[in-house]
Image: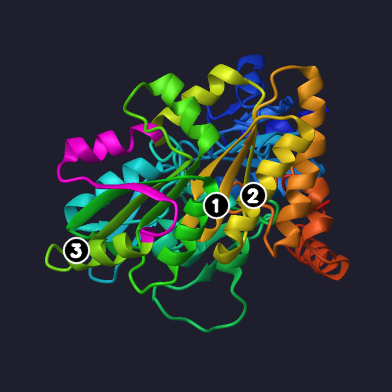
Amino acid sequence: MNLPDTLLSSLRQHFPAGSLSVEMAERLAYAYDNSRRNALPDAVAFPTTHEQVEILVQACRAHRVPVIARGRGTNTTGATVPVEGGVVVSFERMNRIVKIDPDNRFAVVEPGVLNGDLQQALKPHGFFWPPDPTSSPWCSVGGNLACNSAGPRTVKYGSPRENTLGLRAVAGTGEGFRCGTYTSKGSTGYDFTRLLIGSEGTLALITEATLKLTPKPSGLRTMRATYRDVGAAARAVARIMAQPVTPCALEFIDDVALKLARDYGGNGVPVAGAMLMIEVDGEPDTLPSAVEAVSRAARGEGMEELKIAETAEETQALWSARKALSPAQRTISPNKINEDVVVPVSRLPELVDGIKALSKKHDVLIVSFGHAGNGNLHVNLLPRDEAERERAHACLADVFALVIALDGTLSGEHGIGLVKREFMPLALQPTTLHLMRNVKAAFDPDGILNPGKLLP
């Protein structure tokens, strides 16, 4: 669609020069995200205030024009691709840290603040915000909230849903509202804060967030355990998570991923059937006993070697395999399918074995690694040609069916977007989906917010 002249002239009264563009260069730049899906918007807006967002949504609603909220485009599910055209609202200029309140352990930020910049600003106060996606140096807090994006620390500290106190937002009606609290406890009506987090911009556009802060532990120890096979490593994860000391990171890497990383990253990557990267944090006087408890649980049938880093250099060396994985995968398949399924931790061995069987059945290379302490595996299908791409899509459907059969769910932190919409009926009952559509209609009665995403 082309935007009506009346809409453009109305918006230009409130968006100064350079903050609203219909030029092809900007439209092309905001047409895609990290999913490699692509659709051209009709315009791109760069608001700097909550009030501008209200005005924009009200004007677009009057003309039935889609509105797509966007952070930095790092998501992998097509959640910010404007499939029906309309206006992409990029929050990159709403990037102020409004307030840091160490006494009450919260920070108020605008959605365009980068996760990494926020962590740096919190350091002098002795705090951090727990969500730490791999893309944290360049992903935005608003994007983290939209997809409930987390990272390795979730195993101990939780996801954005557990670490956000309140939000300011604009619904699809163009009405601004606040939800949540400035306190760590609250029981006042429906919990809209947790509802909006993970809703991928389909219910409202978040313009401000009150984030719950956590004191930064002063000590950290890193361990690397290698195993004979993936089953032994998966069973070790279940043992580690069944004892009282919760690691702050527990990452699983399968044998295929290790071989890839070794081919790419050299001899620093061990030869093994599977590997766990484990981190334990806390105060220096409690760390040795915590490390011993986790090490004891990591040991068991099939373990080959356990290394504990003593210096920062050793820690970096132990993480080398994990860091080599992404570039190694790109050398094999530019068309990789990256999923982030989750199962109960006790069923992780069944998931790992099942994925091995599906890789063989469909003759598709699959690399599995990820946040094993949550049962959250990144299952990467790496098709190398057209025939393998077709087999990969059939394999993906079987992966999702396996996950649901193991009482799991389709996504831990990437969200649904475009890519997983068709599989939602596998995960949710028709009555549940019907209620979700009713919630969507209450927030966005004309369906202008990020149409074509999340709900099938």
Q: Quadrant of the N terminus?
A: top right
Instruction: Please report the residue visible at 78 percent of the width from the left and 64 percent of the height from the top.
Output: 436
Q: Which mark is residue 231?
A: 1
Quick one: SS at disc 2? helix
The amino acid marked with disc number 3 is Leu
Instruction: Please report the residue visible at 67 percent of the width from the left and 45 percent of the height from the top.
Output: 355
Name the residue carrying label 3: 287
The answer to the question of whether label 1 and label 2 lie on touching residues, with beta carbons closer than 8 A, is yes
Q: Work out whether mark 3 precedes mark 2 in sequence or the reverse, and give the earlier one.
A: 3
Q: Work out whether mark 1 precedes mark 2 in sequence or the reverse, and give the earlier one.
A: 1
Name the residue carrying label 2: 353
Would you call the spot at circle 3 few (<14 residues within 10 Å), some (14-19), or many (20 or more)? some
The amino acid marked with disc number 2 is Asp
Instruction: Please report the residue visible at 69 percent of the width from the left and 53 percent of the height from the top.
Output: 410
> Which of the 4 quarters of the picture holds residue 247?
bottom left
Q: Which mark is residue 24?
A: none
Instruction: Examine the structure image and report whether residue 316 is included in the region drawn in magenta.
Output: yes
Magenta-colored span = 298-321
Question: How far apart, in angstroms, are the residues tagged by discs 1 and 3?
Answer: 28 Å
Quick one: SS at disc 1? helix
Residue 329 showing in the rendered view? yes
Q: Nearer the viewer, residue 82 or 276?
A: 276
The amino acid marked with disc number 1 is Gly
Residue 164 showing in the rendered view? no
Q: Nearer the viewer, residue 138 or 293?
A: 293
The answer to the question of whether label 1 and label 3 lie on touching residues, with beta carbons closer than 8 A, is no
